[in-house]
Image (spheres, coloured by chain):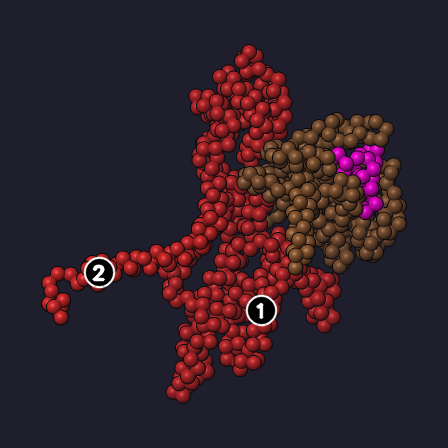
Chain colours: A red, B brown
Amino acid sequence: MTDASQSGPMLAADGTPLKLSLARSLRRQKMRALMLIAPLLVFVLLSFVLPIASMLFRSVENSIVSDTLPLTVEALAEWDETSGELPDEPVYDALTHDMVAAVEAKIHTRLGSRLNYEETGMSSLFRKSGRQFKKLDPATDGPFKDKVIDIHDGWGDVETWRVIKTHSVKITNGYFLNAVDMRRTPEGAQAQPEDKQILVKLFGRTLFMSLVITGTCILLAYPISYLLANLPMRVSNLLMILVLLPFWTSLLVRTSAWKVMLQQQGVINDTLVWLGLVADDARLVIINNQIGTIVAMTHILLPFMVLPMYSVMQTIPPYYTRAAKSMGATNWTTFWRIYFPQSIPGIGAGSILVFILAIGYYITPEIVGGTKGVFISNRIAYHISSSLNWGLAAALGTILLAVVLLLYWVYDKIVGIDNVKLG
Amino acid sequence: MKPLKSIVIATALATVAGGAMAQEMTIVSWGGAYSKSQLKAYHEPYSAKTGVTIINDDSSNEAVAKLRAMNEAGNVTWDVVDVVAADAMRLCDEGLAMEIDPDTQLAPAPDGTSAADDFGDLLVSECFVPQIVYSTTFGYRTDMVGDTPPTSVCAIFDTETYPGKRSLEKRPINNVEWALVCDGVAAEDVYDVLETEEGQNRALAKLDTIKDDVVWWSAGADTPQLLADGEVVMGSTYNGRLFSVIEEQNQPVAMLWDYQVFDLDGWIIPAGLSEERKQRALDYIYFATDTQRLADQAKYISYGPARASSAPLVGKHADLGIDMAPHMPTDPANSKTAVLYNFEFWADYRDDIDAKFQAWLAQ
């Protein structure tokens, strides 16, 4: 019992201060826990964070011009792009050196397709001049200005040089400007010509339609979830299977099924005509437009709304409503004042899920959306797989990500993210 | 136990050795009936001749993006890739496909004509070996056009005579050319007109007259389905798809060959293969693009062989037993007004006109 009366820190059995010993063992536990999740952490980092970060970096990366034509870019620094006059001999001399090297390495056409995104005709300018440049000897054949313009008159066009100079920076804001219907010019950022403006409109449409789809999902899912949560187990299990069944069917199959249902010679129109509700020559147009996209996507995303709603509603104790009714509340008051507020966390969770999934959809809008029902993701897909303008696709993707994060923040401010429950 | 054990070991060893010896190559194509025709005409005879196992990958519609990603990762897993000519040019421009010399690396025709002459103008890119000529053309419902079946491509703009929806591809290529031709531009001047801002607006204005009557498709199977369901009265698609709707499914559909646009489909070899894989890929292409092989493919699908010397060898369909020649887009009766896809023009103008076209569609 002498230990208790001892002054100074309390010691553990091995003589070290208890506090230190405790901290050490806690640290050891934490390390062990970290080691346990380390494989997952590394996996997430390697397979998720890194690829996304590198893809986002593409939206500003633009070293191709200065890597392919290093001397030319340097020489162009001297040239005044607003003068309206062609650059002088040193630039053409540098271009010849660069192009001969680039043709040797077979990278000149790659630069051509990069610059063609900014100015029509650059692709063929680089492809067609490549072979001719090969015949020049940069050491002895100068002066080059007239010879180069002879190769292709594009080299005698001030616009070509303006484009090369404008896009010669290694880190560019050009893709982001393109993503909001603007473009990088020597005179600063300018709006795209009106007949090429489309992306801002598509962003707006994507947000608006995703909201509408979230709204229709709430309207349809609420009664279903209520039924699921309040029916006897046997019946509700059966209902649950009906909700999940489409969930297990291929997305493409479900979307194509909607085509059969909605098209003008489809099941719905045929039925309406047969019932005499619609004239045969005035069949409803309910696919290949916004209606088609909303209907098909609501159907596809419905389970994501039903499941969180259902699991929240299941936890609402039935005696609350009974208590309210016993004290004289009407059915409506009971629902609105007692039941509904308790189900809001489920609506919140479902809405976030559905909205974020909807905003990135592209297969379904592509198939049933026609021209008025397509999303920004359809343009991203086009730039990834057809036009190969990955910089622009990355910029569009980054903006989409930023918009989602912003909306998430707004949601947190208004509703509160603590108010979201998955069950 | 002992004999059993040694048998197991021997089998395992044999499998390992066999695995190392059996040569494999991955060939990428479009899938469906098209891949099947290649399997019958090229892959099976080639495997029988050389023992090389061929693995099919149906990724051609995203081949360009995937090849670029593989190239950046430094791990190209494909040996031979089937792409359309425009994609081949893009891959060649990007340095993602290797150059192939027709004189030394392709088979000459049986009569000794060099491959370069036998393919002629169809060798549109240094990296590309054409295989077939296909066309984008129109099919129409025979029961929805009354007594006046359309004979001109301009029927798509004539909504008075041919009421109902028509399906067009959701991209400017081909549509703007047809629009200009039907707006009175001579076929040989189309691209001169299209180079100008006014020309592009003129084409869009012409398309604007039928905008509400168009169903826009993005997959080749869309128009055949829309025609079969009677959803559209006429629509554009690839001629092989229409052949199967008409001849194999016996739908009331007929071909409208006027101003069909020829396009090419063929092989490229990805850049950056090991020497061994490159030689194997070249050997396969030498075999698969000779005169007889190209003619054989036409037995299974109605696309025209790209070699001039293959045309006389085209026979009957393998299952249906009908003569294939009249169903070929290259048949003289069908190709009176045909035009060849303008690869140079679209390589330059595709990004620009596509942006305008999509903006117009969204209006």
The quadrant where residue B135 appears: top right
Residue A265 shows which numbered tag? Answer: none
Whole-percent x, y for residue B178 in the image: 73, 41
Q: Which residues are magenta?
A: B285-310
Circle 1 SS class: helix
Q: Amino acid at mark 2?
A: Asp
- Is residue B235 placed above or below A174 in the rendered structure? below
Q: Residue at x 67, y 50 (%)?
A: B10
Q: Is residue B43 visible?
A: yes
- Chain bearing mark 2: A
- How would you rate the neighbour count of disc 1 (Cα within 10 Å): few for under 14, some for 14-19, many for 20 or more? some
Residue A244 shows which numbered tag? Answer: 1
Q: Residue at x 44, y 70 (%)?
A: A423
What is the CA distance from the residue labelled 1 to the residue labelled 2?
Answer: 60 Å
Residue ID for mark 2 = A14
Q: Amino acid at mark 1?
A: Leu
Q: Nearer the viewer, residue B178 or A393?
A: A393
